[in-house]
Amino acid sequence: MNSSKIQETQNEICFLKIQYAAHVSYNTAEKYNFLAWCACIISAFSIFLPSALHESILNGIPFLFDFVAVVFYIITCNNVKWGARLRKYFDAKVIGINPNQFSKSEEQNIIEKAEILFSQHHSDGLIQVGNTGRDNPPGVKDWYEFTKPLDGVDAQFECQRQNVWWNKKMTLCRIPISIIIGICISIVFLFVMQAINRSVLNTLLCSGGIILKICERACENIKYMRVSNRIDGSKETIEVKPEREHIEQLQLLIDERRVINVLESNSVHKKIAAKLSALYSKSA
């Protein structure tokens, strides 16, 4: 597989639809993750409900919103898994790293999913498959760009380098925002818990959802950072001595990280995609 072949393959309409479907899946996951947070926050702040209300209402409302948060969490995880699966297929077929790892039925399911998502967002899909990362809005065409001709493992590794580089840039945008939001929510929540006197059961129902959500986010981010560190180490090994087995190992780690429920902001990506594309082409 050489760089010109990769560019030709990734721009075939079938693969553009698959990449767009992955984009839709991750964006849907981001939306439902946000809704899960909203449900947890509403549950927590239901402690402000008048104490004169019947106990079944005081306890039922936080329980209901915690249940809704769980449903949204499940939907989020399902969309993350689909996004990762679609990206895994795209890379396997386009970059040519273990392209025969999918069974016929798996390929059929993936292509069906891509077609369904593309048809559900047809107008936006047409824009996305026609636009590159440098356009406004950024699209999925020319997902991997090459500043010079490359062959074999060098071409494959360049695609992986781009994946790792983009991920790091988006992470640098996500972490400060997440920390600020997390600190604000925690401070307000702790203040509320101390300021209001409620029964132990009501306090647990109001606080349980958001506490579990914060713990779940912490666990997922720790997993994400650990895999990211392994990816960095694998990338450095390949830069010293590029070999096919190392390329395949790095791809396994990239696919593993994609399944972890840590999401970048689509709105941030839209704003900085063109600048990052230009920066990478100048620095690569």
Image (cartoon, helix red, strand yellow):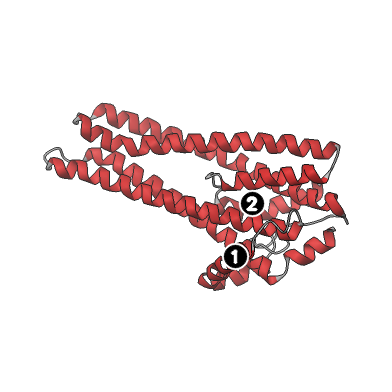
* Near-viewer residue (22 or 249): 249
* Residue behind mark 2: 272
For the residues labelled 1 and 2, the Cα–Cα distance comes to 38 Å
> Counting residues from the N terminus, which is met first, the one under dot 1 or under dot 2?
1
Point 25% across, 41% down: residue: 46
The kind of residue tagged 2 is Ile
Mark number, residue 53: none
Residue sitting at the far top: 194
* Residue behind mark 1: 105
State the image coordinates of residue 251 (x, y, percent, origin top left).
Answer: 71, 47
**Looking at the image, residue 284 lies above or below residue 270:** above
Nearer the camera: disc 1 or disc 2: 1
**Looking at the image, residue 40 lies above or below residue 92:** above
Could you say whether the residue bearing mark 2 is in a helix, strand or loop? helix
Whether tag 1 and tag 2 are in contact, CB under 8 A, the answer is: no
Point 34% across, 42% down: residue: 41
Q: Is residue 124 left or right of residue 12?
A: left
Name the quadrant of the N terminus: bottom right
**Residue 79 can be seen in this image:** yes
